[in-house]
Image: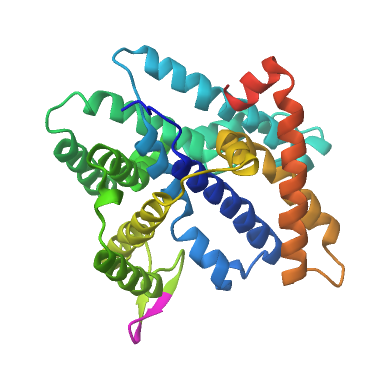
């Protein structure tokens, strides 16, 4: 599954995905409490993290020995641990200001149990996915076995919610999109999608976008439907909503025959931008608070552009110091 030549379509997909992430966080932290009502935020969050994991599945090349897991550990977990410590200085700043340093060990334990509580959860989730993939891929019934494992995880967590800890809950959510990426690459599905199928995918995409909500209830198809973790409807919609978008994006990527310096830089530094953009988003949301721009489209635009530019400068600076780059960005 090694790439024989640079896939410019994947470059564009990765660049597109990381720009959406920065924009999504600019909206989220600017609007604070009502970001879920923002149509752009809603659209981005319906598929952008599945897009990242799907691309990871498309590009995966695990090799034949356990060294793959160590390589991924250095790429994903070491940066996760270091950024967890760095960001804890922000998240727990009030406790640290009051010299309550004892709060940190418990905070780190909470992050390990639930990586979304202060950590770069996607790095942790992707490593868990890589571990499962490394062992499951050896089966001749890889796809069937993988789907069975996901279904089993969903069933078990209904009775044992603690199985959602340590990234296993993230695994069951995102592994299907990783499998989709593997499937797209193995069978070159994007190249086989016909024009009438593109139209059908667009219709299905709109259908699920109407039905999807990140939290709470959704007013879909003429009636309000509870959108919670125990709803079969919510589970089906949550799993299927990103799929037509991912297929359409991969199809569009096949038409990208060349790239440019900006797109290639974003593609190569996707993980780096993901890890370091938060600090600038937080800072400029704070600086623009209590101004006439607060919680407006203008604020979102300023935060997005400035955070993107300063993230580029931060990543470019760190990349000049190989040891720091390897520790913080895994490469």
State the predominant SS element of the stretch in magenta.
Answer: strand
Residue 99: which quarter of the image? top right
What percent of the width, then of the height, locates residue 225?
A: 35, 77
Indicate left or right for 289 with 77 as reference. right
Identify the residue at image location x=74%, y=49%.
307
Identify the residue at image location x=70%, y=31%.
86
Indicate left or right for 21 with 169 as reference. right
What percent of the width, then of the height, locates residue 224?
A: 37, 81
What percent of the width, then of the height, locates residue 295?
A: 74, 69
- Furthest residue in direction front, as rendered: 257
Does residue 295 show up? no
Identify the residue at image location x=71%, y=56%.
304
Q: Is residue 180 magenta?
A: no
Position of 317 relative to 35 (above/below):
above
Indicate left or right for 171 with 318 as reference. left
Position of 154 relative to 293 (above/below):
above
Position of 200 relative to 48 (above/below):
below
- Furthest residue in direction left, as rendered: 140
- Residue 277 or 160: which is nearer the viewer? 277
- Residue 265 or 330: which is nearer the viewer? 265
Indicate left or right for 53 with 192 as reference. right
Instruction: Count the labels in the image.
Output: 0
Q: Is residue 222 magenta?
A: yes
**Residue numbers of the magenta segment:** 218-223
């Amino acid at each position: 599954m090694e790439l024989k030549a640079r896939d410019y379509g994947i470059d564009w997909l990765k660049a597109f995905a990381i720009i959406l992430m920065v924009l999504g966080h600019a909206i989220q932290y600017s609007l604070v409490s009502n970001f879920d009502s923002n149509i752009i935020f809603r659209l981005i969050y319906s598929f952008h993290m599945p897009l990242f994991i799907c691309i990871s599945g498309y590009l995966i090349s695990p090799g034949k020995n356990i060294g793959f897991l160590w390589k991924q550990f250095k790429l994903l977990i070491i940066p996760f641990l270091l950024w967890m410590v760095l960001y804890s200085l922000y998240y727990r700043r009030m406790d640290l200001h009051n010299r309550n340093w004892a709060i940190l060990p418990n905070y780190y334990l909470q992050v390990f149990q639930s990586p979304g509580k202060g950590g770069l959860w996607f790095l942790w989730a992707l490593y868990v996915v890589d571990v499962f993939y490394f062992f499951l891929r050896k089966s001749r019934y890889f796809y069937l076995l993988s789907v069975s494992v996901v279904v089993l995880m969903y069933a078990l967590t209904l009775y044992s919610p603690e199985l959602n800890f340590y990234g296993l809950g993230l695994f069951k959510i995102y592994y299907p999109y990783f499998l989709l990426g593997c499937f797209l690459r193995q069978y070159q599905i994007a190249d086989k999608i016909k024009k009438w199928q593109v139209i059908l995918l667009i219709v299905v995409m709109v259908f699920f976008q109407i039905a999807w909500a990140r939290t709470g209830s959704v007013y879909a198809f003429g009636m309000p439907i509870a959108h919670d973790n125990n709803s079969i409807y919510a589970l089906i919609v949550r799993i299927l909503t990103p799929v037509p978008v991912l297929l359409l994006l991969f199809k569009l990527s096949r038409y990208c025959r060349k790239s440019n310096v900006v797109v290639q830089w974003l593609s190569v530094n996707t993980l780096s931008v993901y890890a370091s953009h938060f600090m600038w988003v937080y800072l400029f949301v704070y600086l623009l608070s209590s101004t006439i721009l607060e919680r407006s489209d203008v604020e979102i635009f300023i935060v997005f552009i400035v955070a993107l530019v300063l993230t580029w400068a931060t990543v470019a600076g760190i990349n000049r110091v190989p040891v720091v780059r390897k520790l913080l960005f895994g490469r």
